[in-house]
Structure formats: structure tokens, C-alpha cells
Image (cartoon, rainbow, N blue to C red):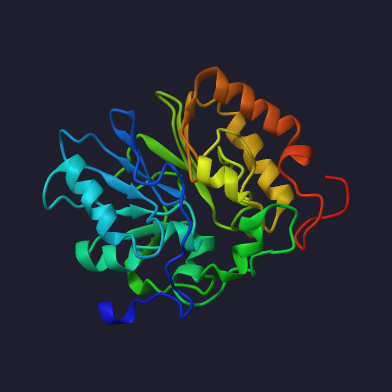
Amino acid sequence: MDKDISYGNDYKFIPATSIGNGLGIEVLPDLYCYTIQIVNIVLVGNPKNNDFVLVDAGMPHSANEIMDVIEDRFGRNSRPKAIILTHGHFDHVGAVIELVKEWQVPVYAHELEIPYLTGKESYPNPDASVEGGMVAKMSPMFPNEPINLGNHVETLPSDGSVPHMPDLRWIHTPGHAPGHVSFFREKDRALIAGDAFVTVKQDFLYKVFTQELEINGPPRYLTTDWQAAWESVKKLEALKPSVAITGHGVPISGETLTDSLQKLVQNFEQIAIPDYGKYVDKRKH
């Protein structure tokens, strides 16, 4: 069965990093954010009871690092109950094949992401022409072919619940990807935003490297529907989160999060939407 799961032919290591690489932050007792090169994975669950899930699966060739992080936090031979994906871009599924083979656990994603996770459909090509910095120019080298998880991937329940994460619900936040989802917990207003918004200007190589805190919209070179992306940010801001872990950049909380999200919603055209690019709608939003 496992021989039928595979990455695309363009799967490869991407030589990009940041000063946050290898840094783990316990955001809450049961929320742990860890940076792999330029992207975050999240471990959801209390280390005391060893009942946890992994949200997203890092960069290509990062499986051993992810397993080491889990061992450090939850103990030897620990494995999550499931892998939950915010979406299927290469930097969020980079180690998923190896992890599924090692752990034999299910992967869950929104139904609109399933074609990109079962080898049926490629994402639109990254936009190297979009307004932005060097990372945007590098984007054509990023893996873009669909991976194939076969019957290891399942659709998230339609009622908004998340398997093995009883206190969290998933929220459809498209724009960056058709089936992008974020996760929210009402009792403490904790948010796992994925790439719906990020806390670093992901298009600029210097800012990616330094991880300078700057709340922004989704990474420009892979975002294909800016109106949907704006609506998704509005949806998340309306939840009034108290703390947020994003797919790129450092976790953010308190007044900084509240004020920054309000500013992003009110000035999304100026802050997030590029002035030009093949996926930019020139009409007024």
C-alpha cells in the first residue's frame, strides 16, 4: 500500500532558511510551534498525556527533524493521532510521505485540497512576476506537482470538528489555496491561522531570514484569489483571537495581534494585495 504514495517529480530540498530555524516556542501548554527553515509546524496536545496531533508537515526532507522534535516534547516512540493540514503547498507537506510511512496515521485536509494530495491536480504555477522580493523570483523552483497520499488522506468532517482535536474547529479560509483551513478554539480564543495571514513579509528574502514581526496577508507568489483571501482575514479577525500561530513568522498575541489584524482588514489592499501580478484582479475590490 505504501508504495503507492509519493511526492511529485519536482520534489526537492529548498535551500532557504531563517534565524528562527530550529526554534520551538510553547505558545500555550498544549500548543507548541516549531520552525523548520522558513515554515512552522504545530503540535497540539499536552505533553503530560501524550495525546496530540501534528498540524502541517514542514519542508522537504524534514521528517527526521520533525520526529526528533516530537520525541523531545512527548517522549521516545511518540506519534501523533493524526496529521492535520492547513493546505497542501510544498512547505506544509514536505515530510508527510515519510511521516505517514513511519507512523501509519491518517492525514486530514479540506475536501478542496484532496486533488492536490492524491496526485490528481497541480496547484497553479507560482507567480514570479508578482510585486515582491527575491523569494517571489525564486518561486518557480519550488515543488508544485501534486503529492499522492492515496487512501491515507481523509476529508475533514463537514460539521467543522477536527479529529483528535475536540476543542478546536476548522474554518474554511481560502484565497491562498482553495481548501485552506485555519483552526480556532473558543475557550481561550487560540488560532492556528496557517497561511491565511502571516507575521513576516514572506516575499522578501531579508525579512524571511530575520523573521521581523510584520503582520501581512498570505504569501503573494502562491496566492491566486485575493478577494477570497481578504474575506478569510475578515473572518479570522471577527473571532477576536487572543493568540495566533501562523504558517510563517513568530506567534503573535494580545493587543499586538488585535491591532495588527484590524489594520490588515482595513488596509488589505495596501498591505497585502500586490500592485501587479498574474493573479491580481485590477478591478477595485
Q: Which residue is pictured at 49% across the width and 29% down the height?
A: 252
Q: Is residue 238 above or below residue 106?
A: above
Q: Which residue is pictured at 19% across the width and 52% down the height?
A: 79
Residue 272 position within the rendered picture, expressed as x and y whole percent measured from the top left: 71, 43
Left or right of 263, for residue 162: left
Q: Which residue is pictured at 13% across the width and 44% down the height?
A: 75
Left or right of 222, for residue 13: left
Q: Is residue 167 above or below residue 137?
A: above
Q: Number of labelled discs?
A: 0
Residue 33 position within the rendered picture, expressed as x and y whole percent measured from the top left: 37, 39
**Quadrant showing the C terminus:** top right
* Among the 4 quarters of the image, the one containing residue 142: bottom right
**Quadrant showing the N terminus:** bottom left
Residue 196 visible, this orientation: no
Q: 203 or 153: which is nearer to us?
A: 203
Residue 68 position within the rendered picture, expressed as x and y whole percent measured from the top left: 21, 51
Q: Is residue 47 above or below residue 132?
A: above
